[in-house]
């Protein structure tokens, strides 16, 4: 299943700790992982979904459950057909008691005549079919989300490395200035502190990326230490206009939970009708089924409300995130300009090294905020796409 999604990851989590500047750290880390990376596999989003579906134990279990349900369905259907043809021999039939409301022959005859027994058998089998589709949707959704999360973490690492390299460059220039007597030793130490902070961010982000990769591998059913190269690199684009009311109608029509609740509601009403022919409205048996009718009606209403809320919530989150993206883009542009100004004024001796470091941090935080907003947008879009379909299981 191909989904149109948009990813734009620019994230850097700023962690501040003072450690000695060691430029070899990044190269050491790369050297340690080079052998593993040679055994990495490349995955597009579609290929990742395909792999997960193919190797999912949950999908295998659901298919086995469907096979089991088919056996039961065939047995029950034959029994219902037999009983429909010979109502007067009901007591000696193979009719499963699962579909009998009472041992009373008259009620059971009525259930057969008004189609409750047949509809109950059909619904039980249909639910097993839907469970397979719901499990498939769940796996697809989880893989897509994991794919997006890992892409974003890779961008976090990219930005952290960019920040690290920038800080080192500023420090090297500072050393030249210090040798020429342009800046003080304290100014140089400030730049060195900026390098230490950037290195700390880089190393912690690399650890976060490794953890995210393990989470991704778990979702797909890959070995935890399997290195994966994601081949989809998708930039942000505006979404197509969404007709909210039409989306709600589509979701109410497609959702499996509503279909099940609706059929149970109809079956409960037909069952009450069958019971009423034998038990008056003032009897326990009648009132017992009447409660079930009311509960089924409530369940249907709850299911509809839940689906509608899901659609409206996804659209609201999508629109909110999209509106704020342009604001965060401007914030990044302003932070970039502020950094240039800080570097220029520092070159002229009119600002301190701490101002340059602060400008670096502000730029990284602006990129982080933009990334988070775009990521929220992507997840809202993903939620919207699934909210108007058959739904997804737990």
Image (spheres, rainbow, N blue to C red):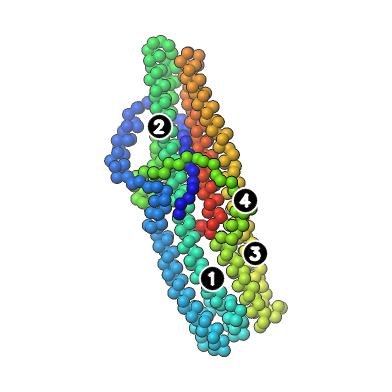
Residue, disc 2: 161
Residue lying farthest to the top in this orientation: 181
Above or below 76: residue 30? above
Above or below 260: residue 384? above
- Does the residue at mark 2 contact the one at mark 3 (Cβ under 8 Å)? no
Residue at image point 51% right, 44% down? 378
Residue at image point 38% right, 15% down? 176
Residue at image point 64% right, 53% down? 245
Q: Nearer the viewer, residue 247 or 261?
A: 247
Q: Nearer the viewer, residue 353 or 81?
A: 81
Distance, label 3 to label 4, CA atoms, is: 25 Å
Label 3 or label 4, whichever comes before in sequence order? 4
Mark 2: few/some/many CA within 10 Å (<14, 14-19, 20+)? many
Numbered tag placed on residue 244 in the rendering: 4
Residue 294 falls in which quadrant of the image?
A: bottom right
Q: Position of residue 126 (x, y in %)?
A: 51, 68
Label 1 or label 3, whichever comes before in sequence order? 1
Numbered tag placed on residue 298 in the rendering: 3
Residue, disc 1: 123
- Does the residue at mark 1 contact the one at mark 2 (Cβ under 8 Å)? no
Asked which secondary structure carries label 4, the reply is: helix
Q: Using the rendered image of the protein, determine whether residue 240 is visible from the camera's viewpoint.
A: yes
Q: Position of residue 261 (x, y in %)?
A: 59, 65
Q: Position of residue 57 (x, y in %)?
A: 40, 60
């Amino acid at each position: 299943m191909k989904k149109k999604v948009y990813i734009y990851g620019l994230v850097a989590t700023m962690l501040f700790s003072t450690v000695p500047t060691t430029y070899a750290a990044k190269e050491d880390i790369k050297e340690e992982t080079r052998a593993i990376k040679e055994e990495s596999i490349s995955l597009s989003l579609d290929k990742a979904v395909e792999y997960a579906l193919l190797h999912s134990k949950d999908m295998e279990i659901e298919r086995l459950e469907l096979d089991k349900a088919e056996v039961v369905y065939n047995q029950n259907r034959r029994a219902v057909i037999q009983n429909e043809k010979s109502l007067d021999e009901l007591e000696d039939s193979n009719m499963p008691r699962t579909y009998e409301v009472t041992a009373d022959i008259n009620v059971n005859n009525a259930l057969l005549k008004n189609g409750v027994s047949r509809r109950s058998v059909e619904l039980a089998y249909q639910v097993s079919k839907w469970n397979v589709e719901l499990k498939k949707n769940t796996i697809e959704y989880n893989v897509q989300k994991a794919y997006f999360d890992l892409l974003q973490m890779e961008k976090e690492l990219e930005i952290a490395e960019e920040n690290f390299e920038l800080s080192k460059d500023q420090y090297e220039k500072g050393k030249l200035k210090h040798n020429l007597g342009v800046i003080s030793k304290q100014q140089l130490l400030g730049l060195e502190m900026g390098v230490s902070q950037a290195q700390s961010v880089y190393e912690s982000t690399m650890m976060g990326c490794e953890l995210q990769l393990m989470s991704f591998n778990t979702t797909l059913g890959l070995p935890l230490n399997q290195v994966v190269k994601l081949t989809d690199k998708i930039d942000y684009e505006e979404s197509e206009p969404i007709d909210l009311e039409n989306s709600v109608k589509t979701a109410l029509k497609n959702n499996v939970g509503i279909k099940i609740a609706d059929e149970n509601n109809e079956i409960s009403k037909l069952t009450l009708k069958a019971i009423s022919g034998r038990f008056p409205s003032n009897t326990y048996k009648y009132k017992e089924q009447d409660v079930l009718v009311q509960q089924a009606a409530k369940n249907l209403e709850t299911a509809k409300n839940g689906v509608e809320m899901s659609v409206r919530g996804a659209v609201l989150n999508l629109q909110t995130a999209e509106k704020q993206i342009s604001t965060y883009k401007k914030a990044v542009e302003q932070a970039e300009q502020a950094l240039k100004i800080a570097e220029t004024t520092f070159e002229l001796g009119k600002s301190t090294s701490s101002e340059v470091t602060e400008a670096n941090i502000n730029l990284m935080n602006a990129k982080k905020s933009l990334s988070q907003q775009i990521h929220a947008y992507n997840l809202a879009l993903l939620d919207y796409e699934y909210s108007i379909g058959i739904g997804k299981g737990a």
